[in-house]
Amino acid sequence: MALRRRWSYVALFSTLAMLGAACSGGSSKEASKKADNTQAASPAPNASSSTPSADPSAATPTTAAAAPGSPAATPSSPSTPAAGSSTPANKSAASNTPAGKQAASNTPAPGAKPGTAAAPTPHAPGPAGAVPSATPGKANYASDVGVSADTIRIGTINMTSATRSLGPALAGVQEQNLDAAVKYINRSGGVSGRKLQLVTCDDGGDIARGRACYEKLKDNVFALVPSLTWLTDVIHDRLPKDKVPWLSWGWFKSEYEDPWMFPCHANGMREASQVADWTAKVLKPATVGIMYLNVSEDIAAKDVATKQLKAAGIKVVETVAQEWDSPDESQHVLAMRTANPDFILSFSWPAPVAKFMHDASTQHWQPKLGFAANHLTGDPGYGPIFGEYIKDKTYTITSWGVPTDPSDTDNAEGGNTAEQQLLRDELIRTNGREYQGFKWRYAGYHHITQSGWVCTRILAKAAEQMGADLTRDGQKKVLESKAWDSGIGSTLYWNAADHNANQNYSYNREFIYKWISAKDGGWDLKRILPDPVFDCKSGNIPAAAKTICNS
């Protein structure tokens, strides 16, 4: 049943606490053995002492806990069965075959509307030299860091213990979803005879601890996958020297300027530009207010949106800076009430935005045309956190399709695809049926976990192309050699010469959704057209990244 009463602060904080506790683990899922890096302000003198064993059995749930400050292998190690599995391991080959083992084709993405023209196969300009490919019949060997004859270790750094602001609910579950992706790949045959092994490190949202995690992981893992950490904005002095491929979460603009980072989501500035453009063209407010998180990327997002709105003749009448662990937002609601904008844009973090919504509800105020918030608010399970207030007045923008009711036919190409179905099934298989409940729906489908699923799959596809001769340099070249269809609405494309060269970065589209009342009285999301910026008639989709447009 939907929650009918208004949420008090006590109820809100209880909900956030329940989310954090639930996302830290459950009886139906094996607990990930993460590193306790609390005291690790600098790298350990001998990082190799915490190197995970190349033997897959070293990371099984029966292994002793890792020493403090060292990264630990999660249950997705090669020999570990999927925890909480309710589906037989010998499920039909058709449902277990990874899409990555299919050759690139010109067929429409899963879930495309009938009659949609087939998309051209995109090709990026190749890097200098030939793109590595597998040598038939060659035996696997320890070809590079983190690679053995039978194992490929990949790493993630997450702010799982940053409990003040949904750390466990966001970052902790990011690790669980990476675990699900790794288990699916391993169960489906692995990568050219090798199994993936996930190694995690918790930085608690602290950059010093994050650097310590990186120093430990860089000599132990082959590559890094989407991690929920502030480190991705400041590690650029190290990656080119260490030559560590990092498929990153895409929060910061600087990730697109690092030749060894492969962003797996549009950054805040790009989203701000797109949602401002969409707001000006579709909603056409006369005045706007802006909320933003008080960090460099979202300050820049606010500035980008302000400039674009001004060019469209729309006046920004109020801006408020939020902190990610702000205890109260009532003063910001009062500031917006005084300015009384027609519409509010939000480039912020879930907790302060949720507090703002509850305080606005308490003060019985809302902007005339409602709100548009960034991807952090666009997820099927987020409704109960924000409360009744958001219904029918709050839009969200995201790089990935969000699963919606099957009756939402406008969402078939992004949120209700075969890949989204596979993602949902594997999350439930790995983490248990509670993934479908209130505690887990948000955790399972937020944009960073989607990015983690997509880019772990892409990493495996690229590694498979190299076969026995798997190297970091080779992985970089293969990732840059073509566009990669995510299967959930967007195509990723990292230009070999410059990952920031694409007009639209590595993405060919964004999506707009609106919070509405579900049929049962709860919360639901509905796809809103046209897509911001990326409509067919605008002609601004680079040919190399173009896939399917709306009619």
Image (cartoon, rainbow, N blue to C red):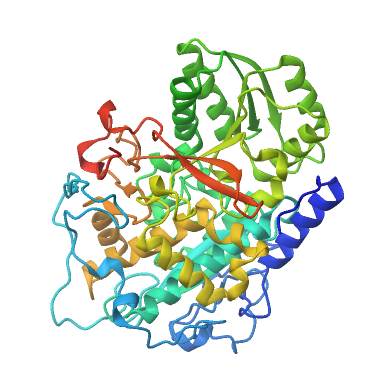
Picture quarter with the N terminus: bottom right
Picture quarter with the C terminus: top left
Question: Which residue is located at x 32 percent, y 48 percent?
Answer: 492
Question: Which residue is located at x 30 percent, y 36 percent?
Answer: 502
Question: Which residue is located at x 24 percent, y 41 percent?
Answer: 546
> Residue 267: percent from the left, percent from the top?
47, 39
Query: Extreme top residue here?
Result: 313
The answer to whether residue 318 is above or below residue 136 is above
Question: Which residue is located at x 13 percent, y 56 percent?
Answer: 130
Q: Is residue 213 visible in this depiction of the protein?
A: no
Q: Is residue 519 left or right of residue 545?
A: right
> Residue 544: percent from the left, percent from the top?
21, 42
Q: Is residue 176 left or right of residue 90?
A: right
Q: Is residue 193 visible in this depiction of the protein?
A: yes
Q: Is residue 536 left or right of residue 377?
A: left
Q: Nearer the viewer, residue 111 or 202?
A: 111
> Residue 462: percent from the left, percent from the top?
28, 63
> Residue 522: percent from the left, percent from the top?
66, 52
